[in-house]
Image: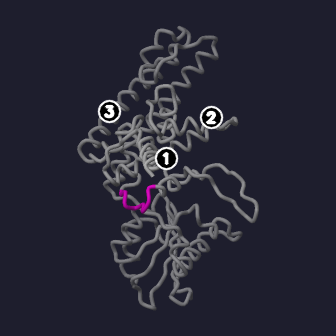
Amino acid sequence: MFKDNIHFVGLDLGDRSSQLTVIDSEGELVEETRLPTSKVSFERKFAHLPRARVAMEVGTHSRWASQLIEGLGHEVLVANARKLRAIYDNPRKGDRADAETLARLARLDPQLLSPIHHRSPEAQADLSVIRSRDSLVRSRTLLINHVRGTVKANGGRLPGCSAASFHNRVKESVPESLRPALLPILETIASLTGQIRGFDRQIEELCSQRYPETRLLKQVAGVGSLTALTFVLTLEDPKRFHKSREVGPALGLVPRRDQSGDQDPQLRITKTGNVYLRQLLVGCAHYILGPFGPDCDLRRWGLKLAERGGKNARKRAVVAVARKLAILLHRLWKTGEVYDPYYRSEERELLSQAAEAA
């Protein structure tokens, strides 16, 4: 517990410099200063500051800054920027005002900041492998679209093929007049494909050597090493969520809510949390509901939902399956259970048998 004379610090992190505001337990302004956004500057400042509660917004520098300040004996709260309407709706918004608002919210009630949890440096380093792979995949997609578009604009058409085989399959189909412009691009695509395969091997090694719990998640058809590892590294600790159902909202897979009186409109999903993991889960849901998805309770449930009608029924079903998949993966990870694809069917049978027996 803090003493009555504790100070509360609001730190508005900037790329070059940061604004720092200190208030006391009575809410009186103690100090306002600006300092360079660097480890040396922060260490010099916070090493001589009495033990305080420090609030900052999540951002590029919040990870290392929070770890450094926490290591110097202070309590650190990293605020969820999307929840701080008091800051981004302020008509007098500025660095000084933002820092003071953070300090006052930390003094009033830390939960008003909706504090987030930063991953460990080890998990962040391993997650960087996945992010680097994603950057290469997006770059390759951009170049493939460029090649196809250029050929099509000149009256040609390239054969359909996978991205991994694109540089080999289409080379002979490129018109002679466009070869000087496009063959170097195909060589770059070939290089990117080789690097992506290298990252795929790294991901497989991480799953087998450092994160064996991913095999629990890969029991579900459609969930591969990439999705399983991203799920584990993003959530990091299954005990962060008391109930598996809390994972869906954390990943932005639940509808927004704007209820007031009798008005409760149906809105789109919140799309909070990790964007890439949400994309992977939606991709898995597409596979589960697609023509090659194996029969299971999750697929049956999703297909029934898609049959309810409406032009957006299929899209809603995909998102709903992605949400249920996230809940299922968390439960498998937390309990270590063997996955049964027909667990709900068996549950219904047992309930039916119990009802007949009664």
Q: Is residue 82 left or right of residue 332?
A: right
Q: Nearer the viewer, mark 1 or mark 2?
A: 2
- Tell me the distance, in whole angstroms, between the alpha carbons under discs 1 and 2: 18 Å
Q: Is residue 89 left or right of residue 28?
A: right
Pick whichever, 41 or 355, lies toward us: 355
Residue 314, position in %: x, y?
A: 61, 35
Which quadrant holds the N terminus?
A: bottom left
Q: Residue at x 38, y 72 (%)?
A: 69
* Front one among 229 and 218: 218
Q: As shown in the figure, which amino acid type bears the numbered disc 1?
A: Lys
Q: Which residue is mark 1?
A: 324
Q: Quadrant of residue 158?
A: top right
Quick check: is 174 in the magenta stretch? no
- Report which residue position mark 3 lands on: 198
Over which residues does the magenta segment extend? 237-244
Residue at the spot 48% in from the left edge and 55% down from the top edge: 245
Amino acid at pointer 2: Glu
Examine the rendered structure and indicate whether residue 82 appears above or below residue 202: below
As displayed, is residue 64 above or below residue 19?
A: above
Label 2 with label 3: CB-CB less than 8 Å: no
Q: Amino acid at mark 3?
A: Gly
**Percent x, y for residue 120?**
34, 59
Q: Which of the numbered marks, if any, corresponds to residue 307?
A: 2
